[in-house]
Amino acid sequence: MHHPSPDVVTAWLAALESRHLADLRVPEVTRALRALSSAYVERRHTVARGATLDSRGKRAAFALFYAPLHLYVTRHIVESLGAGEPPPSSVLDLGCGTGTAGAAWALAAGGVPVSGIDRHPWAVDEARWTYARLGLSGHARTGDVARWGQSDGSDPALLRPGSAIVSAYVLNELPDDARARVEDGLFAAAERGIAILVIEPIARPLTPWWDGTVRRFAAIGGRADEWRFSPELPKLLKLFDKAAGLNHQALTARSLYCRNH
């Protein structure tokens, strides 16, 4: 398994801090993080991502806190599953946010190309920056993931057999009909030999549909896992974690993975 140089991630984190704390103070970001956490955890099904990123403070909080956590979680899952060997030819990140889930898989696979789709223009710009800072060949574009299962609109080269798709913390934010369409698209891709990784929160109230999706994945040779691990978080993430009252003792997630060669 290829392990990305810690210097690459460390340098990215330092650049991230400089980028988002240039005009904001840590207490401002901490207050925004509390509001962002409330939106995601308490009102996830009624607050769209566009609304949760409606201020500079919330965007900074997402970029400085949740995005790195998503990178750590995805990297842990990819490495534990051995999903980087053999490396996929490329990684497509559906609902990419700031690009960290797709980047984590791309790095674990030795630096393969990565592409991202997100409906929020700020997130798309941030994903492009993330890819560049992590030394990856990548691009991101604005698009509605909710329509991906109908007409993905992606570069066909990124969806050829041997490539990969990651959907991290996205399906639970979609209405049932849109989620079903995206799932259909993922299953169709898996049957064409494209590796699929879905990552979602471990809390069942956020994913009442999970068991049914697990059964569908199992039917095409996929597997489901739950994860709990305790990485050494960088100093700034620890500070935000404690100040916002989140106090992660461990990072948790659940995943679905299918790779039919």
Image: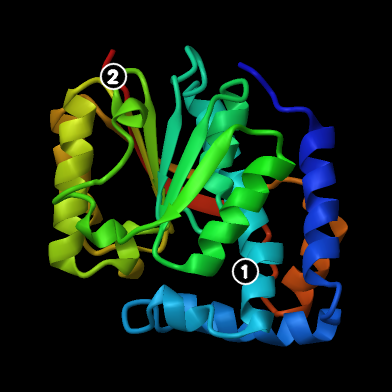
- Can residue 41 be seen here? The reply is no
Q: Amino acid at mark 1?
A: Phe
Residue drawn at the location 14% of the way across and 40% of the way down: 216
Question: Local crowd at mark 2 within 10 Å, few (<14), some, or many (≥20)?
Answer: some
1 vs 2, front mark: 2
- Relative to 183, residue 188 above or below: above
Asked if 73 appears above or below 220 in the picture, the reply is below
Q: State left or right for residue 28 relative to residue 34.
A: right
Q: What is the secondary structure assignment of the residue under circle 2?
A: loop
Q: Nearer the viewer, residue 131 or 101?
A: 131
- Quadrant (top left, top right, bottom left, bottom right) of the N terminus: top right
Residue that mark 1 sits on: 62
- Give residue 155's position: percent from left, percent from top: 33, 36
**Residue located at (52% from left, 43% from top):** 139
- Asked whether the viewer can see residue 32, the reply is yes
Q: Give, as a three-letter code, the residue at label 2.
A: Pro
> Quadrant of residue 249 in the image?
bottom right
Q: How many marks?
A: 2
Where does the image place residue 75, in percent across and percent down from the top left? 59, 37
Apparent side of residue 186 relative to residue 28 in the rendered image (left or right): left
Q: Along the polypeptide, which appears first: circle 1 or circle 2?
A: 1
The Cα–Cα distance between marks 1 and 2, rounded to whole angstroms, is: 33 Å
Q: Which mark is residue 161?
A: 2
